[in-house]
Amino acid sequence: MKDNNYPKLHNATWPGIVGKGDDSQPIIPFDTLLQMTAAAEVDGVKFDGIDIGLFDPHVPVNSSDDELKRLADKVAGYNLEIGSLVAPIWPPEGGSAMGSREERNRFIEQVRKACSVGQRLRKIGIRPNGIIRIDSACSPEAWSKDPAGNTKLIAQTFREAADVAADFGEQLAAEGEICWGGMHSWKAMIDTLNAVDRPNVGFQADMSHTFLYLLGYNSPEDRILPADFQWGDRAALAEGLKTLTAALRPWTIDFHVAQNDGTVYGSGSHDKTGRHCLPTDPNGKLNIGEDAGYWLRDENGQLTKRFRHICWDGCMFPNEVMTQQKTWNDILAAMIKVRQQHGWQE
């Protein structure tokens, strides 16, 4: 029997920027991440591509045609493709999706720029699939001051951004992370997506971030697992994941493989966010290969084949960890297990 070759396995480059920039943790150059991704190998299997955050100094959202052609040539030179892109929709270049008209216009303009990059990379031939990732660029605490009104504003901004994206043939995926207002719980996320009501807007599931919806950190009333849940209760965890994925899977158009240790950082009642951890972390609460199936298979256990590629997302790791080749080999090994269990052949 031949090994599965879909979904394609991608690494993410934005962990080289997110949480970096000071003297102790300088930004990891794009070329370094590209080289380490290409060098990763497990039993002859390698990464197929990369997903890119459109941030300076990696790949600016204002990149020219010539710059994107050079990027494509560089990535192709490592036998990799490009998949999903992250739109830099946050202030000061962008703005809150529930902010003033000026702020929301800046948000939409950043989406337009990201979609332009995506379309041009598709035309070059280096980007066969993938979405443009967005969030609300506002905090749960700010959102909670007027939940109904702010959800309505976020949805309006997302609709306008979706119409812009459609002009470029792109889809927008809203990230399921508890630190974004109007997206901070599974019920809030569904309310927002229902209000948007655009065929090219969906959900980006991240096994680490979206996992925290189960625990209701920024929305206790929406927690799925019982308040007295114990981590050793694998059966209860499985039932919680079934409930969560049944609600969000129909919306899901992009998927990140990741691990989580069940903890958050941040302060206050409405600004906590999750920690990724390495796939080999003994404190990891997810069975990565098995639990990915809740997202990649339907309620009857049939493959959805909704995504042509899946991506590893692991932010906030120390540079000393991210610059070890073993780290990327271990990550690739976890990705391969997901594809072995929930992939297919073409």
Image: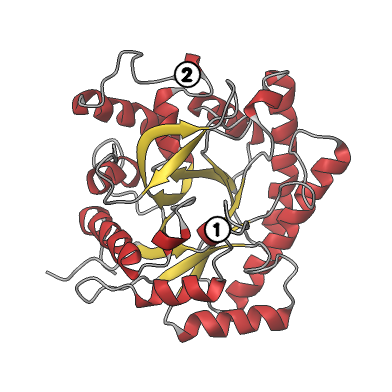
Residue 218 in view (yes/no):
yes
Is 146 rendered above or below residue 51? above
Kind of residue indicated by mark 1: Gln
Q: Is the N terminus in the top left, top right, bottom left or bottom right quadrant?
A: bottom left
Kind of residue indicated by mark 2: Asp
Image point (65%, 78%), residue name: 68
Residue 142 position within the rendered picture, expressed as x and y whole percent measured from the top left: 71, 25
Displayed quadrant of residue 238: top left
Q: Is residue 231 left or right of residue 173?
A: left
Q: Is residue 1 left or right of residue 272?
A: left
Is 292 rendered above or below residue 36? above
Q: Is the C terminus in the top left, top right, bottom left or bottom right quadrant?
A: bottom left
Residue 109 position within the rendered picture, expressed as x and y whole percent measured from the top left: 79, 54
Q: Which residue is mark 2?
A: 222
**71 or 296: which is nearer to us?**
71
Q: Is residue 53 left or right of residue 93?
A: left
Image point (69%, 80%), residue name: 67
Residue 255 position within the rendered picture, expressed as x and y whole percent measured from the top left: 43, 50
Q: Which residue is mark 1?
A: 25
Q: Secondary structure at mark 2?
A: helix
Image point (73%, 18%), residue name: 146
Looking at the image, the residue that sits furthest to the left is 1
Sequence-first tag of 2 and 1: 1
* Label 1 environment density (alpha carbons within 10 Å; few <14, some 14–19, many ≥20): some
Residue 308 in view (yes/no):
no
Looking at the image, the residue that sits furthest to the front is 23
**269 or 343: which is nearer to us?**
269
Residue 132 position within the rendered picture, expressed as x and y whole percent measured from the top left: 60, 55
Q: Is residue 316 left or right of residue 291?
A: right
Name the mark nearer the viewer: 2 or 1. Answer: 1
**152 or 209: which is nearer to us?**
209
Displayed quadrant of residue 235: top left
